[in-house]
Amino acid sequence: MTRRRARLWLAAILLATIAVHAPSLGRGFAGDDRWIVQATFDDGRPNGMVRDLAQAVSRPYWSAVDPLDDPLWRPVTSGSYALVHALSGDPDGGLRETLPQHLVNVALHAIAAWLTYRLARHLHCSRGSSLCAAAVFGLHALHTEVVAQVVGRAELWAFVFGAGATLLAAGRGTARAAGAALACLLAFCSKESGLVWLGLVPWMLAVRPSDGSGRRWRAVGRGLLIAAPGAAIYIGLRTAVLAGLSRPPTAYGVNPLAHMEFAARAPVAASAWLHGVVQTLWPFDLRADYSAPVFDVSAGLLDLRPLLGVATLVLLVVVTIGGRRRPALSFGCAALLGSTLGVANLLFPIGTIYAERLWFTATLLPALAAGPAAARLRGRTPLAGVTLLAAWVGVSIGTTLRHAPRFDSDATLFAAEVARDDASARVHYSHAKILERRGDDAGARREVERSLELDPGMGVAWNDLAVHRIRAGDLDGATDAIRRGVAARDVSPDTRYRLFQNLAGLAALRGDAQIVRTALLRCTELDERRLLDRLGPFCDELVGRGFAADWLDATLGELCDAARDAAGFRAHRARNALRNGRFEAATALCRSALAGLPPGPLADDTRIWLAAALVEQGHRDEARAVLDELDATPRLDERSRRQAARLRALLGG
């Protein structure tokens, strides 16, 4: 094939790749996109990781959602979300926000297909075989999720920079080596799995035909010298950013392997890994959810699927090591092994049992093997190889066009998954949240109940069921749901807090002072800052329901004793004292609280309560001084200004 014809074919393949994924340009955000890429959360809060580029590159990946437990740092990926958002004119919802983000994904995938062609050529594949590699990789249905969901950009960036680094390292010259080193660093900073290129860069140099073993291993050493500095820089920066953070516990329903010892985990992990290998070859049965019901967690090492998984693993290792005669096949096997063994739960458990996007780089193996396989078959049976390859590509395109629309929104995503698989508790629960946002409380409750039938260990589902029962007036049922939720197998700290918060509200409805006190103390232990945000309205509710003032004062005193930072609880105790005419006690508590409160709305309220207590005691000059200090507070909200104005009116100025 001439160079000109190869270029025309490559252009056609890249255009086909773009055309197949172009429908995603009109889609919205689904799944993790709503938490990672959406500039404004559904509750109206701004997403600082998208709106502030400096924050995006310097903070953990999930810090906008959970700043306490996030062991991930992907500055290139997070920074690209923020940069695209900024360049698109500060959109806030709608197609103007979603289209640019999806456009970047489609463009990166086309670049990845082109890089696959270049990799094949560097591995001494013919132009025809290299075009086959680009077609298989660009039109591979397993890539649907990576392109359709914006969060798949982490995989795209890691591949583009990693493959680019490999091609640069294969050339000569200081400038190319420096460019390869920089590209390696950017690949590592795109996603943790990008570290696979630390091995693939030197492996490319090892398997390319050379004149002697000495040169071969010198080339490997050169590859390591290029890639290793970037890895060292990345690990150092990552350690500094994530200092003090730890991985949160993984829910059993999401990944039961995280709760198993190695001997029990390995057979299931081998089965899941084999599933991924099969999907790289036959990607025509795709889904968005791979939680616990998809794989048999009771599988033993002597069962068929684990045995096939181990056999396949051994075969790929042999081909990788012994691939001197077939460098493209060896490199493809190395790409599959290197990119998947770290996320297969074999060596250590991760946050999911399986995900299609984790196999993006692994599809280099079928891509690099497709051309030679088709050529060999065509040599024996005319046109058979081309026909089979064309059929595979056609079915893959059809699978992508059928699967991709599910990622239009959470509603389409989980409605499709519920229709496909009724056995996933996680899917039913996610669908319940969609129905709840739509206002379909009856449908949401049915889905929550179905999720608990499938997995009674979901603490978060018990909490939601309790809320539904409270709304329906079933207080006994709500109490039972909360107790089951607290005792459930999977209860995150956030869910545990919400369970006790709802228990406190439920006990208030029933007038049970002892349970209210116990629940508030547990909330203080779990997240005192969060409790403080709603303690004022809750105290008002307790007073309105007739709870005794002395009981509330004693309860707030216990919360002060239990809290690590008691200033906020002293402020609420001061307000309770003021409400009950204990002005001297209110004054002392306010002064004590102000000594420890940071600037903010609660500190402003505490100054108003202090001024009110001083007015009641006739200390008018001290009250004016407190109000003057309050007026000097920057960004004082309108409510506080009105309250201060009423107090000044009482003081006569």
Image (cartoon, rainbow, N blue to C red):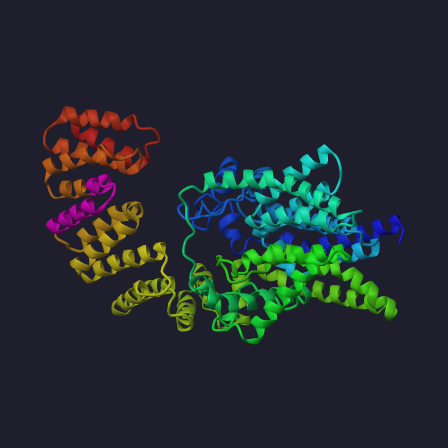
Examine the residues drawn in magenta and state their main secondary structure.
Answer: helix
Q: Quadrant of the N terminus?
A: bottom right
Decide whether residue 566 is among the magenta residues. Answer: yes
Residue 48, image x, y percentages: 47, 41
**543 or 197, nearer to the observer:** 197
Q: Quadrant of residue 177?
A: top right
Residue 62, image x, y percentages: 47, 47
Residue 45, image x, y percentages: 43, 45
Residue 287, image x, y percentages: 58, 65
Decide whether residue 551 is among the magenta residues. Answer: yes
Answer left or right for 305 relative to 379: left
**357 or 573, nearer to the observer:** 357
Q: Quadrant of residue 278?
A: bottom right
What's drawn in magenta, residue-wise? 549-572
Q: Residue at x 45, y 45 (%)?
A: 64
One can see residue 650 in this view: yes
